[in-house]
Amino acid sequence: MRWPLDQHVVTQGWHYNSGASHNGIDLRTQIGNTSVRPVYAAAEGDVCAVQLWDGHTRDERSMQSYGNRVDIRHADYKKQSLVSRYAHLFKYIVAKGQHVREGQLIGYSGATGNVYGAHLHFEVLLGGKRTNPLVWLDDDFTTASDNVYTYGPGEHAVERPAAAGVSTSTTTNGLQIITAKGLTNQQAWTVYMLATQLQLVTMRLYSADFADADCTHQNIEVGPVSKGDAKQIMDKLAAVGATGTAEAA
């Protein structure tokens, strides 16, 4: 399967960071000031279910906790049904029974249903049972923190063909740590607000301390974060006239 978002940052895995069962993965959708991102079909198939959120999330007779939702039935795998699920959408633009191509736009991410913040919840069901979605996808992703669950014993990503002349003997997690020193309080506050939008503060990936006795300047550290988040932080630092360094985590 292909990734349902262009940005591949996993914030919660097959198990929540707390260790509780999750039965899917959560993908970050916040980029800059918006969390409404295009959502694409992970593989070719037929839309077998759509759900319009009714504003209620705890009705045991329904699946309203998923919010606006799309399910796609794909070709059987090893004689078992294969379905992908996309939840908490801002809206969907497909209809039940519609045939979709792999990579076709099916909707936009949002924060409907039982959520604490905007993200895309993605599931893969084989024979009606949820499976770890990461085993159906390649390894082109980063995790929002080192606490995010990825693979269980014997599980692994779908293998990607090695690019010509590129060695695959070593891999990195792609995470970076941003440090900046001597920021004015206003500069630090601006970076803090961006980190809040990216949910880095709630994940305790932002820290700051005063650089001088009169508390007029701060040193900050952000990370480990994905390369995309690191770029946004570095761009924000430059925009407020500050400098920082980005190093591999």
Image: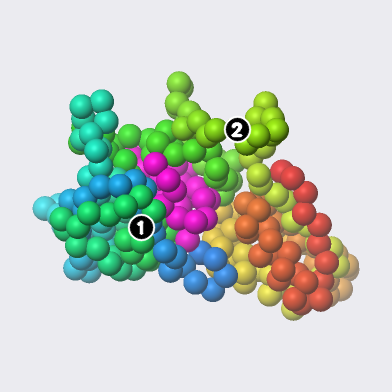
Left or right: residue 137 compared with residue 232 = left
| The quarter of the displayed image where residue 33 is located | bottom right
View extreme (top): residue: 154
Camera-nearest residue between 154 and 190: 154
Q: Quadrant of the C terminus?
A: top right
State the residue at coordinates (76%, 61%): 220
Task: Pinpoint residue 210: horizontal percent, then vertical percent.
Answer: 81, 65
- Which amino acid, by three-letter code, is at mark 2? Ala
Residue under pointer 2: 162
| Furthest-right residue in this view | 213
8 within the magenta span: yes
Q: Which residues are magenta?
A: 1-29
The residue at the point 48 percent across, 28 percent down is: 156
User: Which labelled disc corresponds to residue 104?
Assistant: 1
Q: In the rendered view, would you say 125 is above or below 102? A: above
In front: 93, or 235?
93
Q: Does the CB distance between marks 2 and 1 fall below 8 Å?
A: no
Render colour scheme: rainbow
Specify the principal SS of the magenta part.
loop
Q: Is residue 103 left or right of residue 166?
A: left
Taking the image as shown, residue 149 lies to the left or right of residue 114, namely right
